[in-house]
Image (cartoon, helix red, strand yellow):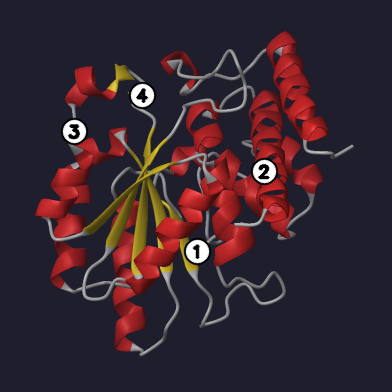
Amino acid sequence: MYKEKIRQLSMIATKIRKHAIEGIYNAKSGHPGGSLSIADILAVLYFDVMNVDVNNPKAKDRDRFVLSKGHCAPALYGALVEKGFFSVEEIKTLRNIDSFLQGHPDMKGIPGIDMSTGSLGQGISAANGMALAGKFDNNDYRVYTILGDGELEEGQVWEAAMFAAHYKLDNLTAFVDFNGLQIDGDIREVMSPLPIDKKFQSFGWNVIAIDAHDYEEIQNAISQAKQTKGKPTVIVAKSIKGKGVSFMENQAEWHGNSPNKEQYEQSMQELDAFLEELGVE
C-alpha cells in the first residue's frame, strides 16, 4: 500500500477517534475504548474498500456494513461524518433525546446505517441474512460486520457461525475486535472465548489473523477474503482498547466511561498532535 494512502487512512482514523471522543464527552456517557480500537478498520472499509454512495445510501448493489458490537456506535458515526452522510455538528448531540444519533445504531433514523444493533450477537445474524439475500438475488455486493471479542460469549454468535458456513456465505467478512477486554475485565477471566481462530476454523470459516492497526494487513486480509470461495471469512484483528489516547489504552475501565473536561482536553491534544505528525493542520 502506498505511503500516501496509509497517511490518508491514518488521518481519517484519527478524525474518527476525535469524533467518538467528542460525542461521548458531550453525552457524558458512551463506550470510548472499543470505539477507538475499531477506527482503523472503519477507515479502511469506508474509504478504501466498500461500495457506498452518500447520494444513494440505499442502492441495491451497495456493500453492507453491520456494527454487531453496537455500543461502539460513536466510531461508526465518526466514519459516517467523514464520509459525508451527515454534518459534524450532529456529533455533539450524541445520546440526546432529540438527536437521531442514539447510543446504538438506528437504521430508521440515521443516514448510512444498514442495521439497527445493540443486543450482542444479533448483528452478525442480520449480516448473515443480508449475505444470503445477495446470493438469492445474484447480487455481487459484499457484507462486512464487526464483533467484539466479549461478544463471542453470546451463544447466538456461534449459531450464526454455523449458518454462515452451512450456506457458504463467501460474500460475508466478519472482523473480531480482539482487544482482550470487556466491561468486566480481561475476557480470559470473565468467560474466555479463546482460541478465537481455531473455533471459527472448526465452524468452517476461513480465518485470517492481523494487527487491527496496520492498514496494509487490514487491506490484504480483505483482499484474501474476496478471493476465498465457498466459505465466509473472519478476520481476527488484534487491537488495543482505547487506541490513540494514552490513558485509555488497554484499560478495561474505559469500556463504558466518559471523559471529564481535563481528560477530554488531553485526549484531543494527543489526537491533534498525531494529526500534526501526519501533516494535517
Residue 181, numbered circle = 4
The single residue placed furthest to the left in the displayed view is 202
Mark 4 neighbour density, 10 Å: few (under 14) some (14–19) many (20 or more): many
Mark 3 neighbour density, 10 Å: few (under 14) some (14–19) many (20 or more): few
Q: Choose mark 1 or mark 3, whichever is in front.
A: 3
Q: Choose mark 4 or mark 3, whichever is in front.
A: 3
The answer to whether mark 1 and mark 2 are in CB contact below 8 A is: no
> CA separation, marks 2 and 3?
30 Å
Q: Quadrant of the C terminus?
A: top right
Residue at the disc numbered 1: 114
Q: Choose mark 4 or mark 1, whichever is in front.
A: 4
Mark before the other along the chain sequence, 1 or 3: 1
The residue closer to the viewer here, 281 or 93, is 281
The answer, for residue 199, to whether it is visible in the render is yes
Residue 10, numbered circle = 2
The x, y position of residue 43, in whole percent, is: 60, 51
- Residue at 28% across, 47% down: 121
